Image (cartoon, rainbow, N blue to C red):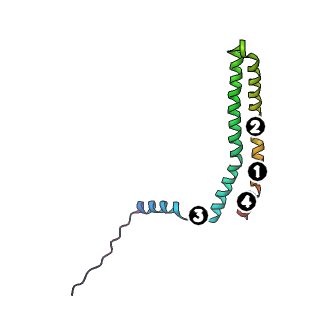
Amino acid sequence: MDEKKETFNYTYSASQQQEIKKIREKYAQTTQEEDKMERLRKLDASVTKPGTIVSLIVGIVSALILGVGMCCTMVWADTLFIPGIFIGIVGIVGVIAAYPIYTRITKKQREKLAPEIMRLSDELMK
């Protein structure tokens, strides 16, 4: 009779097992509570992003306009002094308006996302 010996070889490596666990954790389903907490963090962060972006753009552009106005009054004072003053005033108004724009957009975002944030926070607190 021709008998075949079937053998099973097993090699254990602690470091390899840890690496496998780390990789597996990346792809494993997270618990529902962790998902809710992550969603709550993202919603909270998304409240201020649009206002920050718009106010930064307005502030930077306005500061550049203010700089052009200053340049007109100091460098080309003989021909562009009066227009430079008006250009500078427009820049100053824009710089001053940047913060109220931020607060207004942020307030609207808070009103928009408040029900979802409150619902998620109530679920997590229970």
Image position, residue 58 (x, y; %): 71, 35
Residue 2, numbered label: none
In the picture of the structure, the residue carrying the numbered disc 3 is 30
Residue 99, numbered label: 2
Q: Amino acid at mark 3?
A: Thr
Q: Quadrant for residue 14, please give it.
A: bottom left
Kindly identify the residue that appears in the image at 76 percent across and 50 percent down: 110
Q: Secondary structure at mark 4?
A: helix
Q: CA distance from mark 1 to mark 2?
A: 16 Å
Q: Amino acid at mark 1?
A: Arg
**Quadrant assignment for the C terminus:** bottom right
**Residue 118 colored magenta?**
no
Please state the extent of the stretch shown in magenta in the rendering. Answer: 7-14
Q: Amino acid at mark 2?
A: Tyr
Identify the residue at the far front of this view. 79
Q: State left or right for residue 30 relative to residue 81.
A: left
Q: Secondary structure at mark 1?
A: helix
Whichever of callouts 1 and 3 sits on the residue coming sooner in the sequence is 3
Q: CA distance from mark 4 to mark 2?
A: 29 Å
